[in-house]
Amino acid sequence: MSWQKFQRALAPYLFIAPFFMGYAVFWGYPVVNGFWTSLHSEQFDPGGRQWIGFDNYRDLVSDDRFHHALVNTTQYALGSIFVIVPTALVIALALNIAWLRFRGGFRMAFLLPNVVSAAVIAIMFVLVLDRNYGVINTYLVEPLGMEPIDWLGSPSWAMPSLILLGLWRYVGINSLYFLVGLQNIPTELYEAAALDGAGRWRMFRDITLPLLRPVMLFVVTVAIIGSYRLFAEPHILFGGTGPNDSALTVMTYLYIMAFQSVRFGYAAAIGYTLVVIIAILSILQLRVFGAFRED
């Protein structure tokens, strides 16, 4: 009887064991080994690596190129928060209008850019942003009598180009997130506010925004994490760094250190520094949006 009880108690753990084994092999081990690598010199041969402690992290403090990549990535993150997210909210408000027709078609159209790979979108925008034959210059800039904008060759236009690409790719899916949140707000609240004489702006400020706080927290958190992990788009659009490193991101710099300079220890240190930055920003967002409040 005791053996049967032991089998019954052990059976659930045996069923879930394959998942945890795969999790440990394909996630746990790389995480631990990556941090261990960041504490060693950049030599490729594992047998020839030398323990240097936190020297790689100390070198990052004085690495001007890393600072420049961090500033560029932060600029893109700010563009995501203050350009992409508000645009998505405005579109969601428009899609939530009761009399709007073909809302299902709009939702499908907004979802499509998010299911296309980043590499395909970047290649497409290489053509869209071309200085001589690009769609934007040909149909928007030149008809206004302006000189063609060198989107991909000018340092001052590199970050706007990336934000424009992000706007096209992510505004649709974020609009759908906001739309779900809007549709879950009880209409009785708006009716009661209208009876009290509240205008549309007052209802938006006192009803819509507070009740959208969980959705807003999710969208902003995902936007910031995705911004600091940006790699494929600048790598394809600008060949990695752009003119004068104007499109250099932290992930691109990590790639350069690992696979061009063959400094795997330094690249691992960049990766774990990025993890700490994202964790700090995520905690700050939780504080700002009041995720720890019980109201």
Image: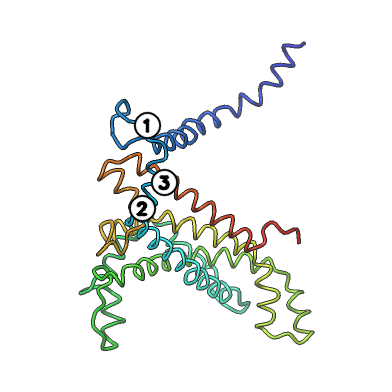
What label does residue 285 carry, if any? Answer: none
Q: Secondary structure at mark 3?
A: helix
In contact (CB < 8 Å): disc 3 and disc 1: no
Along the viewing direction, whichever of 272 and 173 lies nearer the viewer = 272
Quarter of the image for the C terminus: give it: bottom right
Q: Secondary structure at mark 2?
A: loop
Quarter of the image for the N terminus: give it: top right
Residue at the (67%, 21%) spot, across then down: 10
Amino acid marked by disc 2: Ser
Q: Nearer the viewer, mark 3 or mark 1?
A: 1
Cα gap from disc 2 to disc 3, whole angstroms: 16 Å
In contact (CB < 8 Å): disc 2 and disc 3: no
Residue at the (54%, 75%) spot, across then down: 90
Amino acid marked by disc 3: Gly
Q: Earlier in the sequence, mark 2 or mark 3?
A: 2
Disc 2: which residue: 62
In contact (CB < 8 Å): disc 1 and disc 2: no
Amino acid marked by disc 1: Trp
Cα gap from disc 3 to disc 1, whole angstroms: 18 Å
Residue at the (47%, 69%) spot, across then down: 84
